Structure formats: structure tokens, C-alpha cells
Amino acid sequence: MAGMFELFNDEDSNFRFRITAPDGTVMATSRPFPDKQSAVEGIRDVREYAGMGHITDMCLAPAAFTAARPQLPAAAYPVADPRCSSLRPAPYPWLRRPSSPLTPA
């Protein structure tokens, strides 16, 4: 069974649609539309553009992740794990760093 587009009114009386998976999970919700016809056209556009849409990886590189995170003092981390290759103690012993850095596709 395929997913479903559900057309609805939001709390501001605008028209929106949401895409739901076969199990009822909401996968995406649209922007607000001023009228029902515009919302239906939005559904048509999503069907046309997303059917075989390309994937663009906009994720940050691992180095950018570590640079953007605030560094906590070592006392904030409960356990030092020798399996972790980081300079600071591991916050959770069951988490490990990947063995090789991720490379963009």
C-alpha cells in the first residue's frame, strides 16, 4: 500500500497537506497555502518533482561537527573509556567513533 496525501486546515485556517506512510506516520507537512486549489497544486508539484528526485547531501563533515560542539570540562564525562580514540573521556562507553572518516559521495 502506498502513502497518502492528507489535505487539512491548520490552526490559522490555512490549507496544508501532509504525506503519511502506510502505517500512518507523518513523513512531511507542507507550507501553508491561502486556498484549497493552491494546496492541491502543491500536492501535484510534489508528486511531479519528488518521484525520482535526486538526493543532495547537505550534512556537515565530521570535523565541522566537532568544531561546532561546545567542549565540556573533563569532569562532565562520567567514564574514561580506553576504546575511545578521543582526547577527552568518552561520555558513554557504548558509543564508539567510526573506524574510518566519512567521505562525501
Image: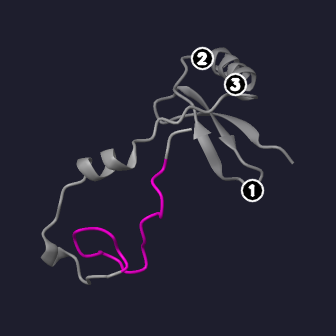
Mark drawn on residue 43: 3
> What residue would you read off at disc 2?
35
Assess whether mark 2 and mark 1 are in contact (beta carbons under 8 angstroms).
no
Q: Nearer the viewer, mark 3 or mark 2?
A: 3
Among the two numbered marks 3 and 1 on one chain, the one whose residue lies closer to the N terminus:
1
Position of residue 68 measured from the top left corner of the image (x, y, whole percent): 25, 47
Q: Secondary structure at mark 2?
A: loop
Nearer-the-camera pick, 54 or 96: 96
The residue stretch that appears in magenta: 83-102
Position of residue 35 measured from the top left corner of the image (x, y, whole percent): 60, 17
Q: Main secondary structure of the magenta part?
A: loop
Alpha-carbon span between mark 3 and mark 2: 13 Å
Q: Secondary structure at mark 1?
A: loop
Which amino acid lies under the numbered mark 3 shown in the image of this protein? Ile
Mark drawn on residue 62: none
Residue at point 87%, 48% (across, down): 1
Residue at point 23%, 82% (across, down): 78
Residue at point 31%, 44% (across, down): 64
Residue at point 54%, 17% (across, down): 34
> What residue would you read off at disc 1?
23
The quadrant holding residue 38 is top right
In the picture, measured across the screen, residue 58 lies left or right of residue 65, that is: right
The quadrant holding residue 19 is top right
Query: Circle 1: is it few (<14), some (14-19), or many (20+) Cα within 10 Å?
Result: few
Which amino acid lies under the numbered mark 2 shown in the image of this protein? Asp
